[in-house]
């Protein structure tokens, strides 16, 4: 599941939505459903981290008020 960390937010969310739809259909064999659930959990965590990072960037802009001094930040939260 290392490939998940390289997904953009939108890609990860789309994949997560597909997993949810498959699981909601209810006709997935148990072992496959468990694997999908595990992958979905990792995707959800990845999406949440991307949202948290975006919020930090927005909070930085709001906090600086009129003195907007944008600092480039990577999605992992570290300054570039």
Image (spheres, helix red, strand yellow):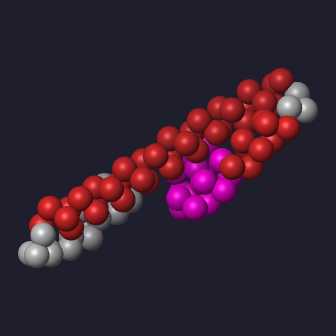
For the question of whether residue 78 can be seen, the reply is: no
Which quadrant: the N terminus? Answer: top right
The residue depicted at 50 percent of the width and 47 percent of the height is 46
Residue at x 90%, y 32% (from the top left corner): 27
Side of 21 where 2 appears, left or right: left
Is residue 31 left or right of 68 when viewed as pictured? right
| Camera-nearest residue between 36 and 60 | 60
- Find the residue positioned furthest to the left: 67
Please provide the residue range marked out in magenta: 1-16
Residue in view at x 60 percent, y 54 percent: 12
Q: Is residue 2 magenta?
A: yes
Q: Nearer the viewer, residue 59 or 2?
A: 59
Q: Main secondary structure of the magenta part?
A: helix
Residue 56: x percent and y percent? Answer: 28, 56
Vertical arrangement, residue 61 with respect to residue 78, above or below: below
Name the quadrant containing residue 69.
Answer: bottom left
Name of the residue lying farthest toward the top:
30
Whether residue 29 appears in magenta in the rendering, the answer is: no
Instruction: Give how far across and how far down residue 38 sits, in percent.
Output: 65, 32
Q: Is residue 19 above or below residue 6?
A: above
**Residue 20 left/right relative to 66:** right
């Amino acid at each position: 599941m290392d490939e998940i960390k390289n997904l953009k937010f939108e890609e990860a969310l789309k994949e997560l939505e597909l997993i949810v739809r498959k699981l909601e259909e209810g006709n997935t064999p148990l072992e496959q459903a468990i694997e999908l659930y595990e992958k979905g959990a990792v995707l959800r965590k990845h999406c949440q981290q991307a949202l948290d990072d975006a919020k930090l960037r927005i909070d930085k802009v709001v906090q600086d008020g009129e003195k907007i001094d944008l600092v480039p930040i990577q999605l992992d939260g570290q300054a570039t």
